[in-house]
Amino acid sequence: MAPKWRDLADRFAEQIKGGQLPPGAQLPQIRELVEAGEGSKETVHKAYKALEAEGLVTSTRGHGTVVRSRAPLKRLGIARYDKAKWRDGDEVAFIADRVASGRAYKRDEQTQTVSRVQADSLVAEGLGVPVDSEVYARARLVKEGAQPTHTLTSYYRPEHVEGTRIVDPTPGPAGRGGGYRVLYDAGYEIDHMREALFARIPTVDEVQLLQLPTGEPVVELHRTTYTADGTVVEFAVGIHAASRFAWEYDFKVPDSAQDRKGQE
């Protein structure tokens, strides 16, 4: 049997998803539910924290607990890297997500800080360079209005980006077409990439930077980008507020048995 706080949270979640509690609706005060016999103060508090962690409500001092007014952003998979978006147009990845979500955006909602750093073990493995090698780190904080959504730090070998717009610290997506267009113009056309995702508890700094509610996890992304000959031209680490994105992938289903038959 589920604990009482879980049962209470599930009942509110059903009302939110079913539309009985619309965006912006305020949930009862904790004391009201306690007086109504829904459980102890601790039980109601746990239920509300569970709803907050699931991205269904927000809780702020002085405003109580309200139903979130916005659905999570679509975080596109393959489609966000379509070359037609950044090579032939100016729809960099975070903008592609906003367009797919039907949401407005401003280019300056992405900040940028560029520096030369020593590669730690994660970055060194990702770029295929020795630990402590000097690499460029291009760190971004992306917001939707005043609300941070995620951070993304891309690492590059200096010989690939020295003298390009990628190392220009001006805020924004590295000019028209973003970083991938810069690499393309430098002769490094991206061909394929690998993304690895995992959820974890955020650090204290991440809670503050992303303005995370208590108990919300983050989704950490590791992205490795290659040219056609297998050269790694970018290794990126992204930290995403879990409730602010809905991850979406659309891909052709492989059939390795058929592929082998075709090679015989």
Image (spheres, rainbow, N blue to C red):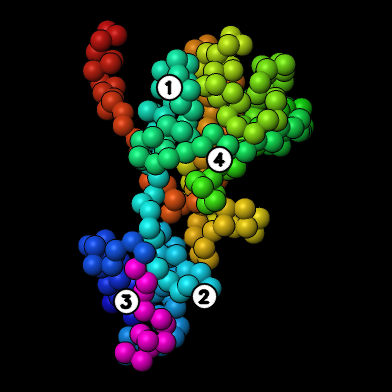
**Residue highlighted by disc 3:** 8
Residue 248: percent from the left, percent from the top? 35, 39
Q: Label 2: how many residues lie within 10 Å, few (<14), some (14-19) or many (20+)?
A: few
Of the image marks 2 and 1, the number of the one nearer the N terminus:
2
Residue 90 vs residue 157, the one in the foreground = 90
Of the image marks 4 and 1, the number of the one nearer the N terminus:
1
Task: Tell me which residue sits at (55%, 40%) in the image.
Answer: 109
Q: Label 1: how many residues lie within 10 Å, few (<14), some (14-19) or many (20+)?
A: some
Residue 97: percent from the left, percent from the top? 42, 36
- Name the kind of residue labelled 3 in the image: Leu
Task: Tell me which residue sits at (70%, 25%) in the image.
Answer: 168
Image-based side of 261 in relation to 102, left or right: left
**Residue highlighted by disc 1:** 85
Task: Tell me which residue sits at (53%, 73%) in the image.
Answer: 61
- Name the kind of residue labelled 2 in the image: Gly
Which type of secondary structure does the marked residue at label 2 adopt?
A: loop
Residue 64 vs residue 161, the one in the foreground = 64
